[in-house]
């Protein structure tokens, strides 16, 4: 009976780790999906962007971080970290020249959009494999 109880607790703790990992990954993807429309908005405002991202970050802080192994998930985490870095740099430099700061953030915005595009490509890499030599299929004549 003790062995069964020990295995049962191991299984439940393993499931708990999986649930935590899944929750963390889902929130990272949610953060990414919320950020991109803000960056692409035609009337993009840095102040609104920073306020919104800070709100998303407060939600992210509640979820414990988990080690990520796949290239896509690591890129996703890097995207979130890069976004937060740009925001903190903007906040620190806010007292300096406004126009220079906005131009600098425009470059960072383009960088984030490019990183998002690469992230999307990495996610869908396995879905779009081209069949090579499709017309040269083997026929044995029967």
Image (cartoon, rainbow, N blue to C red):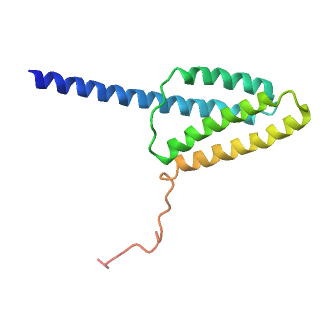
Quarter holding residue 21: top left
> Residue sitting at 56 percent across and 38 percent down?
77
How many numbered tags mark residues here? 0
- In x, y percent, where is residue 31? 59, 30
Relative to 73, is 132 above or below?
A: below
Relative to 58, is 118 above or below?
A: below
Direction from residue 129 to residue 2 in the image, left or right? left
- Residue found farthest to the bottom: 141
Relative to 66, is 141 above or below?
A: below
Considering the image in quadrants, where does the C terminus appear?
bottom left
Direction from residue 107 to residue 24 in the image, left or right? left
- In x, y percent, where is residue 43? 82, 30
- Residue found farthest to the left: 1
Quarter holding residue 66: top left
Direction from residue 13 to residue 115 in the image, left or right? right
Considering the image in quadrants, where does the N terminus appear?
top left
- In x, y percent, where is residue 78? 59, 41
- In x, y percent, where is residue 135? 47, 72
> Residue sitting at 56 percent across and 24 percent down?
60
> Residue sitting at 72 percent across and 30 percent down?
88
> Residue sitting at 75 percent across and 33 percent down?
89
Direction from residue 110 to residue 101 in the image, left or right? right
């Amino acid at each position: 009976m003790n062995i069964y109880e020990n295995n049962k607790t191991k299984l439940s703790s393993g499931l708990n780790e999986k649930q935590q990992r899944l929750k963390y990954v889902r929130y990272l993807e949610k953060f990414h999906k919320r950020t991109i429309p803000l960056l692409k908005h035609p009337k993009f405002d840095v102040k609104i962007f920073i306020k919104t991202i800070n709100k998303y970050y407060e939600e992210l802080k509640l979820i414990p971080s988990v080690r990520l192994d796949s290239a896509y998930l690591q890129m996703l985490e890097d995207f979130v970290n890069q976004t937060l870095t740009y925001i903190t740099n903007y906040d620190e430099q806010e007292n300096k020249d406004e126009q220079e700061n906005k131009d600098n953030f425009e470059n960072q915005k383009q960088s984030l959009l490019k990183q998002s595009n690469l992230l999307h490509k990495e996610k869908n890499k396995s879905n779009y494999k081209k069949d090579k030599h499709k017309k040269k299929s083997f026929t044995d004549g029967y």
